[in-house]
Image (cartoon, rainbow, N blue to C red):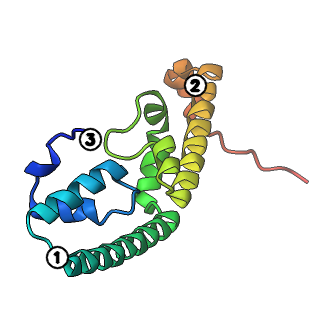
């Protein structure tokens, strides 16, 4: 018999029922058998086993339904406009350092936030494109001519004689 930590015979009755009524998806068969033997030692009846098995199946179905609803909600969950604007503005920072307040691209994809993943990717691409264009303009046209007063003088057009 395999030993578990904490040992099966030291566990609470509720935990023993969860283990004994498992269908082998979460617990090994050996643990299920040990929990069943321990419950028999503690005086559990056949009817209690039948009732707990039925309750566990119903409980698992409810959990599965809740999980499916959560996944469905995640697939259509969206960023607000201010969140998307923040991602666009801070995109170089998010790409270099990451964000401590929101989920990254890979985490969004793995947790099935499909719409948020696409929005974040698009915002990062737009943000990087804007920052790259600004950097290009800053390098190509340096601000050294900003102090030249001739740049800001608007000369009136002479009237044309026809």
Query: Which of the two discs, 1 and 3, labels the residue nearer the N terminus?
Result: 3
* Side of 43 relative to 78 (left or right): left
Spot occupied by residue 158 in the image (x, y as percentages of width and height): 75, 45
Q: Quadrant of residue 125?
A: top right
Residue topped by disc 2:
138
Image point (41%, 34%), residue name: 98
Q: Which mark is residue 1?
A: 3
* Side of 4 relative to 29 (left or right): left
Q: CA distance from mark 1 to mark 3?
A: 24 Å
- Label 3 sits on a secondary structure element that is loop
Spot occupied by residue 152 in the image (x, y as percentages of width and height): 56, 34
Spot occupied by residue 44 in the image (x, y as percentages of width and height): 14, 71
- Residue 22 vs 104, above or below: the answer is below
Which residue is situated farthest in the right direction here? 162
Quadrant where the C terminus sits is bottom right
Q: CA distance from mark 2 to mark 3?
A: 73 Å
Query: Which of the two discs, 2 and 1, labels the residue nearer the N terminus?
Result: 1
Image point (57%, 36%), residue name: 128
Viewer-nearest of labels 2 and 3? 3
Nearer to me, 10 or 107: 10
- Label 1 sits on a secondary structure element that is loop
- Residue 86 vs 96, above or below: the answer is below
Q: Which mark is residue 159?
A: none
Nearer to me, 78 or 73: 73
Q: Quadrant of residue 13?
A: bottom left
Q: Which mark is residue 45?
A: 1
Spot occupied by residue 7 in the image (x, y as percentages of width and height): 14, 44
Q: CA distance from mark 2 to mark 1?
A: 81 Å
For label 2, the crowd category at 10 Å Cα-Cα, with few meaning under 14, some 14 to 19 and many 20 or more, is few
- Residue 153 vs 45, above or below: the answer is above
Query: Which of the two discs, 2 and 3, labels the residue nearer the N terminus?
Result: 3
């Amino acid at each position: 018999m395999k030993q578990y930590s904490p040992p099966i015979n030291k566990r609470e009755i509720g935990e023993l029922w969860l283990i004994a009524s498992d269908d082998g998806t979460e617990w090994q068969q050996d643990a299920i058998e040990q929990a069943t033997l321990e419950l028999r030692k503690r005086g559990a009846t056949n009817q209690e086993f039948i009732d707990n098995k039925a309750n566990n199946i119903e409980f698992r179905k409810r959990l599965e339904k809740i999980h499916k609803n959560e996944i469905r909600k995640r697939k259509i969950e969206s960023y607000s406009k201010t969140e998307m604007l923040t991602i666009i503005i801070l995109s170089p920072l998010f790409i270099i350092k990451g964000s401590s307040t929101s989920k990254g691209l890979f985490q969004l994809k793995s947790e099935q936030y499909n719409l948020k993943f696409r929005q974040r990717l698009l915002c990062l691409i737009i943000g990087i494109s804007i920052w790259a264009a600004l950097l290009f303009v800053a390098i190509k046209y340096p601000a050294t001519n900003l102090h030249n007063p001739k740049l800001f003088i608007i000369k009136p057009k002479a009237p044309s004689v026809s």
